[in-house]
Amino acid sequence: MATKEKQKPFADSIAILQQEITECRRCPRLVEWREQIARDKVKRFQADDYWGRPVPSLGNAAARLLIIGLAPAAHGGNRTGRIFTGDRSGDWLYRALHRAGFANQPTSVNRDDGLQLMDCYITAMAHCAPPDNKPLPAEIDNCRPYLLQEIDYLKNLRVVVALGQLAFQAALQSFPYETAKKPKFAHGAEVDLSGGIRLIASYHPSQRNTFTGMLTEAMFDAIFTRAREIITPIDCQKMNSGDRR
């Protein structure tokens, strides 16, 4: 009970922070773009009521796994209002999370589809959909305080998964790491961060990577299987030995 009472202020703080994120207008270029997309839409989503605002993170303060992405897709999170929801990158992510036991279902279609994350928190370097999926360095800097506040609230963190090189760099900037040299990005690379936290690098599940075969489902699954092994090593040892009680 004491643990739950201790976590409650952080849960409240995260909820307040997410509300603040959804009201942010720090980046004029992104404000104009996200709102224009929400007005103009595309033919296949003409009937949808677009979110058209910064997309909040997803998860709770007790999570031991933090996933850092780049930014919402124009007709994904910017449309649905939920991170990695309504686009192909999200299809890949939630399938992998479900298989690793971090989500209750393998799909994320809209905010009311029943999806629940388990021991997992998903955020992004930029919370607004950018033109060409490329936020400017200054826009990432404007969003960076939100990421730092989230990290401060997530007191149980054991693993950070960075989706793509930019997210990997953002993680290294946000946590002290244990090596003398700055670690290099590579799919599956691991870095020891301060406080006993492990950073795992992954290719981003963008269509450019998944359509070309640079990232396969087996490769992506391996990232979250590894995260699960770090977070719950005893359970994973039982599964590997055939003891599934």
Image: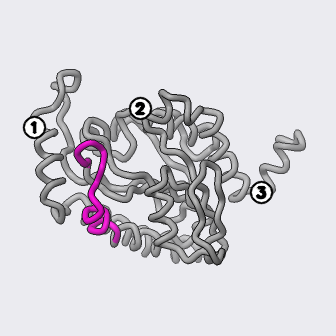
**Can you identify the residue that label 1 sits on?**
39
Q: CA distance from mark 2 to mark 1?
A: 22 Å
Q: Tell me the SS state at disc 2.
A: helix
Amino acid bearing label 1: Arg
Q: Position of residue 149 (x, y in %)?
A: 39, 73
Q: Going from the N terminus, do you reach mark 2 or mark 1 first?
A: 1
Nearer to us: label 3 or label 2: 2
Residue 33 visible? The answer is yes
**What's drawn in magenta, residue-wise?**
129-144
Q: Tell me the SS state at disc 1.
A: helix
Amino acid bearing label 2: Arg
Q: How is the image coloured?
A: one colour
Q: Position of residue 127 (x, y in %)?
A: 30, 55
Q: Residues within 10 Å of mark 1 (few under 14, many from 20)?
A: few
Nearer to us: label 3 or label 1: 1
- Image quadrant holding the C terminus, namely top right
**Can you identify the residue that label 2 sits on?**
88
The residue under the point 63% across, 47% down is: 224
Query: Is 186 placed above or below 242 here?
Result: below
Q: Going from the N terminus, do you reach mark 3 or mark 2 first?
A: 2
